[in-house]
Image (tube, rainbow, N blue to C red):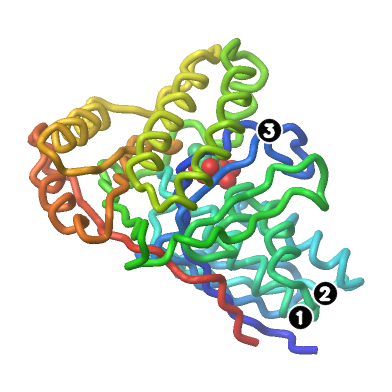
Amino acid sequence: MTNSATAVAHANIALAKYWGKRDETLAIPATSSLSLTLDAFHATTTVTVGAEADAGTLDGRPMSEGELGRVSRFLDLVRERAGSTARATVTSESTVPTGAGLASSASGFAALAGAAAAAYGLDLDPRDLSRLARRGSGSAARSVFGGLVVWHGGTDDATSYAEPVPGGEAGGPLDPAMAVVVLDAGQKSVSSRVAMRRTVETSPFFPGWVESTEQDVRLMLDAVAAGDLAALGALAESNALRMHATMLGARPPVRYWTAHTVAVLDEVQALRAEGLPCWATIDAGPNVKVLCSGADLDVVATALARGTDGDEARRVVTARPGPDLRVAA
Ligand code: PMV
């Protein structure tokens, strides 16, 4: 058994969102979702088995008590399957700002799943790794795969996993790419876990969200199969707005948008009106990710970097489809 392993996983951004669980313990989502794994952001995580107690660093600093607790509980799942009680040391470096709605937990837990499974000697296929990563952070189930990915929501642990969707390759007929408009890379005020639970429990719009998202995923898969980026983009922007509408309906309401977020939404609409096809999506934070064709990426990114709101802090990162999870023992 190898007792140390390193894994690299890339962040993913959902085009049809995961928002709300039907089972909190197993992280079974209320709906299926569809995402694009990005080459621009990744986490590299090493797990070394054999320590006095679980310990970890994140970007060179010791993990906080909360972070380590979450990692330790995840390692317990791996240890349970491996029949081991050995503690481990975890070091993780990420190019994604943590907790800013930029999918840091997706790449982080996918990399942790890959490295921990290998370090504890579990031989898991990609589907099982996706199921395992899901337990750390739902969206991590999708970061096990590169390109376009569908997470089948399922009804239990065995049926809730992600798999790649053909057609998401760079330079292919769809050629999806993203301009990530970073407005605020700080920690969000309400975690997605808390916000989701509050939405499920208190938003009267939640049942409508579940129904329309299942339909969006089916329509998006059709659009991908047809190589129709315009159809995919329009569905993605609408789906993101519906996710935010359902959380605005919670009590107390959850609102991640700032005035800068709205400015970017206006700019994306203006670019479309000028004939440049691009569509916005927003996660659990103020930042906006803009889907476009790889051929238009530089023009879209340049236009968005200019901005209309005089925001000096704005930064735009360009991203193309990223690779599968890689594990090295
Ligand atoms: O995986 P979590 O618990 O961080 O939730 C992710 C939620 C969204 O990013 C808002 C949507 C998604 O599908 O990634």
**Vertical relation: 240 (above or below) 229:** above
Image x and y of residue 204, in percent: 60, 10
For residue 25, side relative to residue 208 (left or right): right
Give me the C-alpha separation between circle 2 and circle 3: 35 Å
Place of residue 217 in the rendered image (x, y in percent of width and height, measured from the top left): 56, 39
* Residue, disc 2: 86
Can residue 69 be seen from the camera position used here?
Answer: no
Residue 313: numbered disc: none
The disc placed on residue 50 is 1
Q: Is residue 321 left or right of residue 313?
A: right
In the rendered structure, which disc, 3 or 1, sits on the residue that comes first in sequence? 3
Mark closer to the observer (2, 3): 3
Q: Residue furthest front?
A: 226
Residue 124 point in image, percent of width and height = 77, 73
Q: Secondary structure at mark 1?
A: loop
Ligand 1: quadrant of the figure: top right
How many marks can you see? 3
